[in-house]
Image (spheres, rainbow, N blue to C red):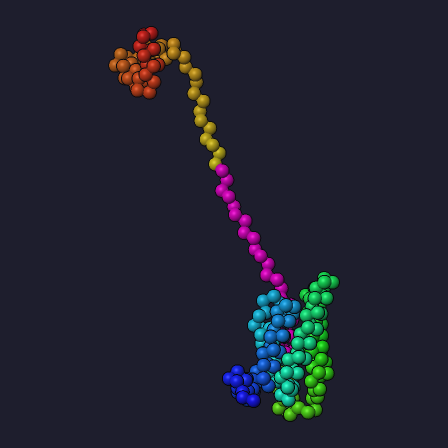
């Protein structure tokens, strides 16, 4: 049976170790990163911490899946993904809040994953080489340090409210009340003035109130 170009490409990719190393790494990384981002175990703004945690855990898983066929690996990983999704849906329906038990949820997820992985992949720490055990130990220490650093309680930053002080409104200056003067009083005042000054006052009054000036001239 002649092989097609597509089957040949898949065979070449398999020879490079993509299905033995890269694919399990990417699947494990995607699962754990998605779980950490959804549950917010390390806080709301913990994207970098979730990425480092998922990267380290994915590298830790690689020694366990070297001798596993990728077809069975994908089928078993799909079952694990479905289990986590169902668990998340059930917790969401009952109104469970992950913020209340972040640490317990973290260790619970790790324990459940190792139990499922041991059952499906027939894993045993005794079969691992010494280098892999050292790597697992270093990764565990690193994760404990990350947990202690991110689990420290930080005091919330208090917001300082600055009240804007408005300048007091200036009191309106009280305008002096002008005494009411009748036309007759005004005529009497003008008559008491000298003729030249009287003419100047009438001229000024004619500029501002021509009708009043005309009435005064007629009555003088």
Q: In percent of the image, x 29 and y 14: which residue is there?
A: 198
Q: In percent of the image, x 65 and y 87: which residue is there?
A: 68
Q: Would residue 96 be counted in the magenta stretch?
A: no
Residue 175 versus residue 16 in the image, above or below: above
Q: Quadrant of the N terminus?
A: bottom right
Question: Quick check: can you spot residue 20?
Answer: yes
Q: Nearer the viewer, residue 191 or 156?
A: 156
Question: Quick check: can you spot residue 103?
Answer: no
**Dominant secondary structure (helix, strand or loop) of the stretch shown in magenta:** loop
The x, y position of residue 157, in whole percent, is: 59, 61
Q: Which residue reaches farthest top?
A: 219
Residue 148 versus residue 129 in the image, above or below: above
Q: Nearer the viewer, residue 137 or 154?
A: 137
The stretch of residues the image draws in magenta is: 142-169
Q: In percent of the image, x 57 and y 70: which residue is there?
A: 47
Q: In percent of the image, x 70 and y 69: which residue is there?
A: 86
Residue 14 placement, left or right of 152 = left
Quadrant in which residue 155 is drawn: bottom right
Q: Quadrant of the C terminus?
A: top left
Q: Would residue 144 be counted in the magenta stretch?
A: yes
Residue 59 versus residue 181 in the image, above or below: below
The x, y position of residue 34, in whole percent, is: 62, 71
Q: Nearer the viewer, residue 57 or 3?
A: 3
The x, y position of residue 133, in whole percent, is: 65, 88
Q: Which residue reaches farthest left?
A: 196
Residue 34 versus residue 125 in the image, above or below: above
The x, y position of residue 70, in whole percent, is: 62, 84
Q: Nearer the viewer, residue 143 or 70?
A: 70
Quadrant in which residue 40 is drawn: bottom right
């Amino acid at each position: 049976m002649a092989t097609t170009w597509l089957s040949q490409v898949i065979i070449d990719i398999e020879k490079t170790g993509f299905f033995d190393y890269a694919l399990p790494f990417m699947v494990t990384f995607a699962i754990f990163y998605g779980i950490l981002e959804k549950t917010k175990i390390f806080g709301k703004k913990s994207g970098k911490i979730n990425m480092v945690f998922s990267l380290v855990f994915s590298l830790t898983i690689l020694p366990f899946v070297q001798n596993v066929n990728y077809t069975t690996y994908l089928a078993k990983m799909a079952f694990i993904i479905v289990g986590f999704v169902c668990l998340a849906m059930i917790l969401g329906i009952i109104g469970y809040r992950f913020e209340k038990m972040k640490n317990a949820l973290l260790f619970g997820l790790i324990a459940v994953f190792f139990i499922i992985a041991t059952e499906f992949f027939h894993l045993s720490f005794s079969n691992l080489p010494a280098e892999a055990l050292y790597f697992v130990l270093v990764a565990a220490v690193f994760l404990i340090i990350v947990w202690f650093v991110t689990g420290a309680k930080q005091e919330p930053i208090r917001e300082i409210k600055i009240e804007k002080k408005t300048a007091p409104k200036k009191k309106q200056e009280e305008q002096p009340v002008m005494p009411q003067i009748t036309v007759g009083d005004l005529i009497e005042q003008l008559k008491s003035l000298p003729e030249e000054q009287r003419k100047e006052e009438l001229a000024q009054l004619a500029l501002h109130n021509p009708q009043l000036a005309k009435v005064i001239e007629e009555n003088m």
